[in-house]
Structure formats: structure tokens, C-alpha cells
């Protein structure tokens, strides 16, 4: 079973490299405020370079280590704040457009606006058709 | 920059966060996930019946750090998340090409 999986992933790699796609796909993972999800989703949809996105409810904290909440006169330290993660796979030349769209839609100027991280994608597969590389995006 | 993704036991989360805090590693994203490893889940006994739980609840911890801190994060998690029993989880390290702080637009390691 695991042998089959290993063979399959190396196939993805080979095909992507043969097509010159291995360096041309990027994974943009954005951690944003839950309330700015709709604005970010709309901004990304208008770009026409984003074929889809994955949304996950996550919890997290940054430099401020969460926040202090007040409830009925008591103060509580909330360690993990609710955030939303948006994962998008795009071609390398579209990364800057994605980042500026995310920034303009998710920026409030207050601490806690979130971060975006860019990693490389070595292969992609559209499950329905078997398309590999950038055409699978 | 490196992304350290670890899959740990949910009850180890607080311990791991405390230990990382002591190492001055601040900032992380936590996701509730389900998974299984080599043992393909576990067999639970309840009221005389036997049930196989295929996917066991785990917590995924994503931490992006500068290259030189990656080893510190991996070894800290390896130390404090370990119980010695099957199901302690795994840690993966992925290369991160760039980062952006949304509030200011800063890029690179200063965005961490």
C-alpha cells in the first residue's frame, strides 16, 4: 500500500519537472481574522488567477501571546485566538497579486491581522482528470 | 525560513506551547486534525464490544521560524511531546520561501 503511494508521488514529481512546472507553482498560506474572510475571498475571486482555495478554522497566537479578555469583572488570558487559514495554490507569477489582494482585504492596522507564508509546490494532481502540474491548478 | 509542522497528542498542546515559550518561540497556528500512523488507529473496548477507531484526534501545530531556530523547535517538541507510547506523533520541516505580515506588509524574516 505504501509502496503504491511512494510510486505515485514520484510520478507527480517527474511529470511536473518534465513540464518545467516544478518551480512555477507556489502555495500561499494566509492566517487572517475570521471576520475578514469574506472580503479576502471576494478580493481573491476578482483576481481570476485563483482557481480555488481551502479554508480551515484554526487557533493561533503571535508575538502578543493571545489577548486578555474581560468578562464579568474578571480578566482572562485567551491563549489561542480564533483565526482562519486560507490555502491557495497558484503559479509563481501570480503570488504578488495574491499577496497584495490579501493584504488590502485583511489589513485593519491592528495587531492580529495575521501572516502569509509562501512555500514551493513540487507537484499537483487534479483527481478528476489526472492532470498534473500547473494545469491541475 | 522553515515551517515546522508537528502532529501531537491533543493533551500535550499546553506543555509544548509552554516549552516553546521558554525557548522564546512565539507564534503558532493550531488545527484540530484526525489521523493515523503505522498502527492504523486503535481498538477501543466499550461495554464488551470492540470498536476500531480509524482516525484518532490529534492537534497539528504549525510554526514558522528562522532557519537557525528550526532544530531548536524540533528538539523541544521531540522532548516534551513524547510519552514513549505509540501515537506520540511526528514532526515535519518544510522550506518557506517568503512571508508577509499583513498589518505592515513586511516581508521575509522580519515578518515572523
Image (cartoon, coloured by chain):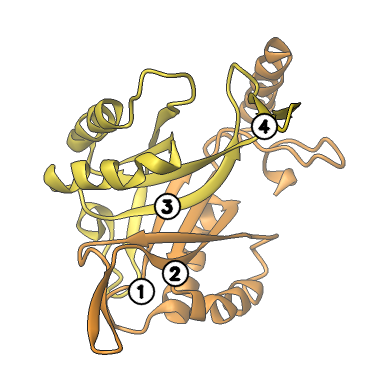
Chain colours: A orange, B yellow
Which residue is farthest bottom? A73
C-alpha distance separating marks 3 and 4: 36 Å
Mark 4 is surrounded, within 10 Å at the Cα level, by few (under 14), some (14 to 19) or many (20 or more) other residues, namely few
C-alpha distance separating marks 4 and 2: 34 Å
Q: Which residue is mark 1?
A: A113
C-alpha distance separating marks 1 and 2: 6 Å
SS at badge 2: strand
Please tell me whether mark 4 or mark 2 is closer to you in this view: 2
Residue B3 left/right relative to A70: right
Please tell me whether mark 3 or mark 4 is closer to you in this view: 3
Mark 2 is surrounded, within 10 Å at the Cα level, by few (under 14), some (14 to 19) or many (20 or more) other residues, namely many
Picture quadrant where residue B69 is located? top left
Q: Which residue is mark 3?
A: B30
Which of A76/B104 is in front?
A76
- CB-based contact (under 8 Å), mark 1 and mark 2: yes
C-alpha distance separating marks 3 and 1: 16 Å
Q: Which residue is mark 4?
A: A19
C-alpha distance separating marks 2 and 3: 13 Å
Give percent across and percent down for residue A51: 70, 60
- CB-based contact (under 8 Å), mark 4 and mark 1: no
Image mark count: 4
Please, is residue A40 above or below residue B34 in the view? below
Please tell me whether mark 3 or mark 1 is closer to you in this view: 3
Residue A100 left/right relative to B68: right
The earlier-in-sequence mark between 1 and 2 is: 2
Amino acid at each position: 500500500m505504501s509502496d503504491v503511494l511512494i510510486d505515485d508521488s514520484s510520478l507527480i514529481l517527474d511529470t511536473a519537472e518534465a513540464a518545467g512546472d516544478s518551480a512555477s507553482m507556489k502555495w500561499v498560506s494566509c492566517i487572517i481574522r475570521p471576520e475578514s474572510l469574506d472580503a479576502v475571498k471576494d478580493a481573491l475571486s476578482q483576481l481570476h488567477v485563483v482557481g480555488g482555495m481551502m479554508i480551515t478554522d484554526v487557533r493561533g497566537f503571535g508575538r502578543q501571546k493571545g489577548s486578555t479578555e474581560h468578562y464579568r469583572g474578571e480578566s482572562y488570558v485567551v491563549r489561542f485566538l480564533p483565526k482562519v487559514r486560507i490555502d491557495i495554490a497558484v503559479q509563481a507569477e501570480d503570488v504578488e497579486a495574491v499577496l497584495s489582494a490579501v493584504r488590502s482585504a485583511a489589513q485593519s492596522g491592528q495587531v492580529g491581522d495575521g501572516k502569509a507564508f509562501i512555500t514551493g509546490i513540487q507537484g499537483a494532481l487534479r483527481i478528476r482528470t489526472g492532470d498534473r502540474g500547473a494545469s491541475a491548478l | 525560513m522553515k515551517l515546522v509542522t508537528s502532529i501531537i497528542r491533543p493533551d500535550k498542546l499546553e506543555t509544548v506551547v509552554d516549552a516553546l515559550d521558554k525557548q522564546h518561540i512565539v507564534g503558532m497556528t493550531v488545527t484540530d486534525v484526525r489521523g493515523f500512523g503505522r498502527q492504523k488507529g486503535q481498538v477501543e473496548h466499550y461495554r464488551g464490544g470492540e470498536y476500531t477507531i480509524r482516525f484518532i484526534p490529534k492537534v497539528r501545530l504549525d510554526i514558522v521560524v528562522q532557519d537557525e531556530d528550526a532544530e531548536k523547535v524540533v528538539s523541544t517538541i521531540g522532548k516534551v511531546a513524547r510519552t514513549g507510547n505509540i501515537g506520540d506523533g511526528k514532526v515535519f520541516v518544510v522550506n518557506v520561501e517568503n512571508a508577509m505580515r499583513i498589518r505592515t506588509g513586511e516581508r521575509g524574516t522580519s515578518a515572523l
